[in-house]
Image (cartoon, rainbow, N blue to C red):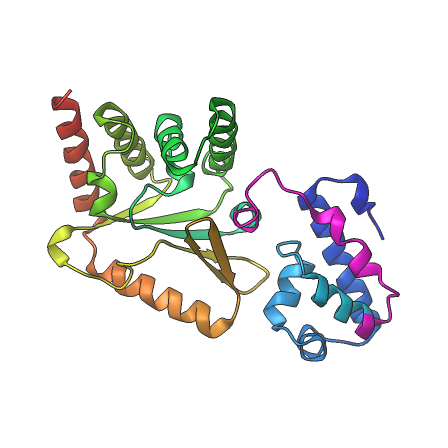
Amino acid sequence: MAKDASAQGPSIARKAYGEELRIRREAANHTQQSLADAVVCSPSMIAHIEAGRRKPRVEDARRLDKELGTDGFFERFLPTLSPSRFAAHFAPLVELEKQATCIREHGAALVPGLLQIAPYARSVFRMGLLNVTAAEVDKRVGERLERAHILADPGGPAMWVLLDEHVLRRVVGGRAVMAQQLRHVAQLAESGRIRLHVLPFSIGSHALTSSPLSLYTFDDAPPLAYVEGVRTGQVYDDPARVAQCRAAYDLALGDALSSQASLALITSVAEEYEHAL
């Protein structure tokens, strides 16, 4: 391998692993499509592994070794791609955020993680975990804020944020925290760092009523969708499933307030919280 994956951090190791897969695939005269057909997975999965975005399952690595004649190489190197500091179901999302050119988020009940301020995130973790220690909460809050650094990078991904009005009205951490949190989101929108839209109560149900959703676009690989539930999360790379998720997002966006009206609503609700203090 061009790089020693075992001596590098997880994201670097995945890139090295993916580059090795590309080299071995091309040496075997396989396209991404033909290799995917041979090992029974989607070509987009091969593309994401080669780009360092996804880690194959053990059974996938075994099939890659068998097809490419690599004598167990890809299975042996799987442990070098883990562990992550983040929860197992959440680790793939962290890598996707770093490499995406565009992120589209829908917040159904909470402000999306990339936009959360520390007091808001602290309340979310404190209420969502059983018998959690203060140190563990602090650790998780730190990790969440670390993810948000991509928003400070001028070369970071473009970001669309679609918030249900429930997110604005659900008091997380108290009125003072909510005022700070909504002011933070408003500032990101006013600066042009995010494109913000709100789905008001007045529209009733909409295409994303039941679930948060994240969509990722990349320069050199097919788009992905991520859906998160209680202690679980699922990355979808099947083109048909991703297209369905994108269509649902577009339908909901069509029902949302304009960016100007959304910003005015968030600012108004922040003022309500401030006046109630």
Q: Position of residue 70 (x, y in %)?
A: 86, 66
Residue drawn at point x = 81 percent, y = 68 percent: 65
Residue drawn at point x = 50 percent, y = 37 percent: 147
Magenta region: 66-93
Q: Position of residue 183 (x, y in %)?
A: 26, 30
Q: Position of residue 49 (x, y in %)?
A: 67, 60
User: Is 211 above or below relative to 153?
Assistant: below
User: Is 239 above or below relative to 221?
Assistant: below
Specify whether 233 is left or right of 167: right
In the image, residue 92 lies in the stretch drawn in magenta: yes
Residue drawn at point x = 70 percent, y = 51 percent: 14
Q: Position of residue 7 (x, y in %)?
A: 80, 39
Of 104 and 109, the residue lying toward us? 109
Specify whether 187 is left or right of 63: left
For the C terminus, give its image quadrant.
top left
Q: Quadrant of residue 71?
A: bottom right
